[in-house]
Every structure is written in structure tokens, then in C-alpha cells.
């Protein structure tokens, strides 16, 4: 579809859906149960499906190779707000919509009803995510960051509980500090260059005199700190395990895409503005990024080994995947970035699927929940075990799934670089640690769990209740629903969708890798992006009021034709 306004739909659609859902959910609260189902849940799901279809159409347009700019308000860049679509932003839109669809389907089975305005907050978060992937302006990137963060604050608190309240306080305080640093960095850049349009910044930063070197490098590194907070880069990752571990299952699954916003921002800004042609601030982030990424990857693997709950294991898998992606970026060549983008699709789908599965596994175990101890297993152990096994292979980077392909391509791309030895050691070592952690978790949860452990589990629970053991899962607020009947249809559909995409990604690995390779090449072609954004002309207005007034002679001094 060549409709020129299609680019803005991923932002406008969730905004309108969220506004409508606020009214619908308030009416549902007043009127109680609605005959024929929950209209708010249905509208939210339809909005997500529509966003997926739009994202697929935009990806098909972006696959042609051009960068497409859209001028909001019909003001030419850099004076107005601009959106830009290329292969990378289109890929992120599709990935966001897929994870959102799995989460929305799962939430319909009961998690959405744990608190008010879940669906509206869900849509506002999608609006912030989509806007961050499309914007061509640094200040509007800050605005979309705030939109998605404000929505995520509400989603994190969804369902209540002391653990979520504690995690949300840390999350809010840390992200407010990050937002303050973002504003300082933006102010520095605007003061030095007089613009915040990223294409215009790319040209003006390169032309800055040597006297501004210290200030522009400071602004560039400050932005790196801000994006590292979002991407959970060492040492700014510590908020993530507690936050993701406390959220409800569909919220945690949606949060799997949030760290990718930071990764995307680093990829965009540090290739376009602070890349090879960035003047005195060229490649300001590259000396730091690969080393910190190696540390993040190593600590993520250690965290999976040290975690005592399955949710903690999955949260540290997200930290490790962020380290892998930032390492791919930090190596700074097209092959490594292509491998990183391919791996990002696998790791995001894997994390989203695992967060949903953890909730069902915990609900199926009578006492221990997702604690890594043997316990009675009341649900469909074979189906949940097979799904967990699939995700574990994807997380560990084992063949035949796409995680193996992504890591193999990353190691090959790192071989000619000076960090080849460390990259091989840390990536392979972290992969081994992840496999050991997931093998231990799978053995305890599925192999060693059964009816004979019920009595032991109850004893352990009773011991804990007297204050001598670890804190039980219910005290953490997740999961509250323990029906023990296995998966509800919506839950099976949501989790099954994300799990099924993992082998499909490996099956279609060739075309997907071709797309990520083209996206990586386009990412380093800064001139195409600059020309597209700054060269797009406003569309002549269909109704020119001033011209009509001149023709009628209503403007003083104007002559009638």
C-alpha cells in the first residue's frame, strides 16, 4: 500500500485506541460484567492485530531499500517534526507488534482484570514504542521515551502487591534520573548546534569547530549513559531483574521489547550523528561499548546461574541478550550489526515466550511456584515442558534454532577485530552458563517434580511461613491465579504464538538474515537518511486560505487579479 500517511498509523492508532479504552474500561468498572464478553479487551486485541498488519505493510515498503520521511504538520525538516521509515525501524515495528499480540492474547485470559485500565496503558505503551522507532528527532525520541515509561509505570503496578510497589519505586526513580540526563544532553546538543533533528544534527555536529570538541563529546557520552539505562548495559542493568521479575506475565513479556528501545537508539544515533563522519566526536561510543557489553553478557550468565527463581533466570537472560546485541553494535562493522539484529529477533521472542510460560509453570506447581525446587506438578507437564525446552534451546544458542545462527554469525564477524579472542571467550562461556542454568531449571521443574514431592513442598512452605525459610511466591504478588488446570485457551494461544515463531525464524533464517544484512548496510549509509529527511518537501495545501484572501482582495495592499 502506497498511502503516504501509513507511516504515522503505528503512532496514531494506539493513541486513539488507548483514549477509547479509557472510556470503555471506566464504563465496564461501573457496569460490571458485560454480556457477550469484555469490549475493552476485544478493542485492544483488534488494535494490536491492526498494528501488526500495518507494520508488515511498512516492512514491505521499507524492503525496497529507500528511506521514507513523513512531515507531521507539513513543516519541512528540521523546522517541524519528522518521522522516518527504513528497514531497521520497520523491523522493530513488526517485532513490537508480534510480542504485543502474544501478550494481549495471554492477558485476555484473566491477567488484564487484575487492575484498572490495563488495556489503555497497554496501547499507550505501544504508542511510545512505535514512536521511538519512527521518530527522526531527538527531542521527540525523549517524548516517546516518556510516553512508554509512564505507561510502563502503570503496567508494572498492575495487580498490586508489595513487591510490585517496591520494584516500581526503584524503576520510577532510576528512569526519572535517566530522563533528567537525557534533557541535559539534548540541551547541550541544541546549544552547540541549534537543532535536534537527527539528520540535521549529523551534518552540524560534523561541522563543529575544534573548540567545541570537549562539549560535543560530553553530550555524546551523556546520551550513551541515557540509552544504556534503557538497554540495561553494565553497570546500569540492576533495575531490570527486580522490575521484570515483579511484573505480571503479559506485562513482563511486553517489557522484553523495552530494552531494545535503548539498543535501537544507540544504533541509530551512534551511526548517524556520532559515526565515522561525526567530526571531532566521531565514534565517541565505540571505545566503551564493546567492553561494557562483554561485561554485561558475562554478568547476565552469572545471574542466570545464581537465580533461585525461574523469573530471575529469564530476567537475567534479557540482560545477557542486551549485552550480546550491544557487543554486536560495538564491534562496529556491518556483518556484526547484521548478526546482532538477527539475534535480537530470536532473543526478544524467546524472552516474551518464557515470561508467559513461567507464569503457567508457577501456577501448575502447588507450593513452590517458580522457585527452583522440586514440587508437585498439577498442569500439563508434557506441553509446558516441550515449550520450555524449545525456548531453552533458543536462549542457549543451540542448533537448530536461530539463536545458534545469530551467535555463529556474530563470532564470525568478530574474528577480524581486535576483540576477537575476548568475544569468543565471553560469548561461548556465557552460552555454556546459560545452558547449565536452564538445564538445572528444567530438571528441577519438570524432571524432579511430581506428586511425591508435594508433601516435601508443603513442609518447606510451612517452614517458610514461620519465618525460617525463603519468601514464598505469593508474597511476591506473582502469580495469584493457581487453578492448576493448565493453560486457558487465550494463554495457550499467546504463549504458543511466541514459541512457534522461534522454529519459524530458524526455518526462514535465510530471508530474515538477508533483510537484517540489508538493514545493517542501510544503517551505515547516513547520507541516504539525511537526504530523505531534509530533502522531503511539504505537500502543497489543498486549500490555501491566504491565496484565496489575496485573490478576493481581503489582504490589505493586495491587488485583485
Image (tube, rainbow, N blue to C red):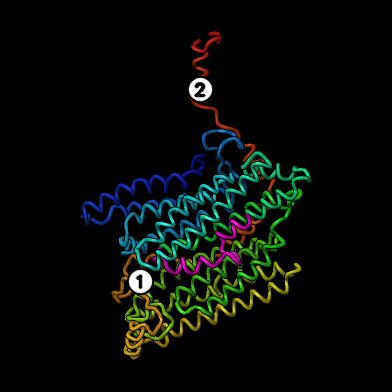
Mark 1: few, some, or many residues within 10 Å (few <14, many ≥20)?
A: many
Name the residue located 32 percent from the left edge and 67 percent from the top edge: 489
Q: Magenta stretch: give its range.
A: 223-250
In the picture of the structure, the residue carrying the numbered disc 2 is: 544
Say the numbered circle drawn on residue 479. Answer: 1
- In this orientation, does residue 512 appear? yes
Of the pair 495 and 204, the residue shown nearer to us: 204
State which quadrant residue 413 falls in.
bottom right
Q: x and y percent of residue 112 in the render?
A: 33, 60
State which quadrant residue 41 falls in.
bottom left
- In this orientation, does residue 509 appear? no
Mark 2: few, some, or many residues within 10 Å (few <14, many ≥20)?
A: few
**Direction front: furthest residue:** 467
Looking at the image, is mark 1 or mark 2 earlier in the sequence?
Answer: 1
State yes or no: residue 234 in magenta: yes
**What secondary structure is marked by label 2?**
loop
Residue 123 horizontal side relative to residue 454, left or right: right
Of the pair 533 and 270, the residue shown nearer to us: 270
- Does residue 394 sit above or below 468 in this rendering? above
Residue 33 horizontal side relative to residue 556, left or right: left
Q: x and y percent of residue 97 in the render?
A: 46, 56
Q: x and y percent of residue 492 in the render?
A: 36, 69
Amino acid at each position: 500500500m502506497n498511502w503516504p500517511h501509513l507511516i504515522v498509523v503505528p503512532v496514531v492508532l494506539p493513541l486513539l485506541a488507548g483514549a477509547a479504552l479509557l472510556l470503555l474500561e471506566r464504563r465496564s468498572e461501573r457496569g460490571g460484567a458485560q454480556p457477550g464478553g469484555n469490549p475493552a479487551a476485544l478493542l485492544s486485541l483488534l488494535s494490536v492485530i491492526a498494528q501488526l498488519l500495518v507494520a508488515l505493510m511498512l516492512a514491505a515498503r521499507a524492503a525496497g531499500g529507500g528511506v521514507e520521511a513523513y512531515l507531521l504538520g507539513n513543516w519541512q525538516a528540521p523546522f517541524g517534526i519528522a518521522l522516518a521509515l527504513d528497514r531497521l525501524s520497520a523491523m522493530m515495528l513488526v517485532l513490537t507488534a508480534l510480542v504485543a499480540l502474544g501478550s494481549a492474547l495471554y492477558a485476555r485470559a484473566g491477567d488484564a482484570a487484575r487492575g484498572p485500565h490495563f488495556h489503555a496503558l497497554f496501547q499507550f505503551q505501544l504508542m511510545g514504542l512505535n514512536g521511538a522507532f519512527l521518530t527522526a528527532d531527538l527531542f521527540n525520541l525523549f517524548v516517546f521515551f516518556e510516553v512508554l515509561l509512564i505507561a510502563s509505570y502503570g503496567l508494572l503496578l498492575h495487580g498490586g502487591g508489595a513487591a510490585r510497589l517496591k520494584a516500581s519505586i526503584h524503576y520510577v526513580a532510576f528512569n526519572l534520573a535517566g530522563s533528567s540526563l537525557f534533557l541535559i544532553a539534548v540541551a547541550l546538543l541544541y546549544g552547540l548546534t541549534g537543532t535536534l533533528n537527527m539528520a540535521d544534527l549529523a551534518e552540524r555536529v560534523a561541522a563543529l569547530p575544534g573548540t567545541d570538541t570537549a562539549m560535543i563529546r560530553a553530550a555524546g557520552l551523556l546520551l550513551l549513559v541515557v540509552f544504556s539505562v534503557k538497554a540495561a548495559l553494565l553497570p546500569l542493568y540492576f533495575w531490570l531483574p527486580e522490575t521484570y521479575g515483579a511484573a505480571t506475565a503479559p506485562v513482563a513479556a511486553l517489557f522484553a521489547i523495552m530494552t531494545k528501545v535503548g539498543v535501537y537508539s544507540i544504533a541509530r544515533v551512534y551511526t548517524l550523528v556520532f559515526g565515522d563522519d561525526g567530526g571531532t566526536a566521531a565514534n565517541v561510543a565505540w571505545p566503551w561499548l564493546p567492553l561494557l557489553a562483554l561485561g554485561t553478557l558475562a554478568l547476565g550468565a552469572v545471574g542466570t546461574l545464581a537465580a533461585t527463581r525461574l523469573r530471575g533466570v529469564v530476567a537475567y537472560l534479557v540482560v545477557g541478550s542486551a549485552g550480546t546485541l550491544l557487543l554486536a553494535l560495538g564491534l562496529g562493522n556491518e556483518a556484526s550489526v547484521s548478526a546482532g539484529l538477527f539475534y535480537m529477533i530470536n532473543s526478544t521472542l524467546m524472552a516474551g515466550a518464557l515470561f508467559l510460560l513461567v507464569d503457567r509453570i508457577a501456577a501448575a506447581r502447588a507450593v513452590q511456584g517458580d522457585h527452583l525446587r522440586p514440587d508437585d506438578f498439577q498442569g500439563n507437564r508434557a506441553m509446558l515442558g516441550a515449550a520450555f525446552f524449545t525456548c531453552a534451546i533458543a536462549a542457549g544458542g543451540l542448533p537448530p534454532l536461530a539463536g545458534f545462527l545469530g551467535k555463529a554469525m556474530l563470532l564470525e564477524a568478530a574474528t577480524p577485530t581486535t576483540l576477537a579472542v575476548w568475544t569468543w571467550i565471553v560469548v561461548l562461556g556465557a552460552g555454556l552458563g546459560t545452558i547449565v542454568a536452564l538445564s538445572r531449571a528444567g530438571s528441577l521443574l519438570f524432571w524432579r517434580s511430581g506428586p511425591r514431592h508435594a508433601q516435601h513442598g508443603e513442609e518447606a512452605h510451612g517452614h517458610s511461613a514461620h519465618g525460617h525459610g525463603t519468601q514464598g511466591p505469593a508474597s511476591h504478588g506473582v502469580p495469584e491465579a493457581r487453578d492448576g488446570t493448565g493453560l486457558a485457551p487465550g494463554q495457550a494461544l499467546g504463549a504458543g504464538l511466541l514459541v512457534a515463531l522461534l522454529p519459524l525464524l530458524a526455518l526462514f533464517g535465510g530471508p530474515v538474515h538477508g533483510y537484517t544484512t540489508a538493514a545493517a548496510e542501510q544503517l551505515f549509509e547516513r547520507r541516504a537518511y539525511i537526504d530523505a529527511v531534509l530533502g522531503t518537501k511539504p505537500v502543497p495545501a489543498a486549500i490555501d486560505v491566504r491565496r484565496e484572501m489575496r485573490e478576493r482582495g481581503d489582504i490589505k495592499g493586495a491587488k485583485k487579479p
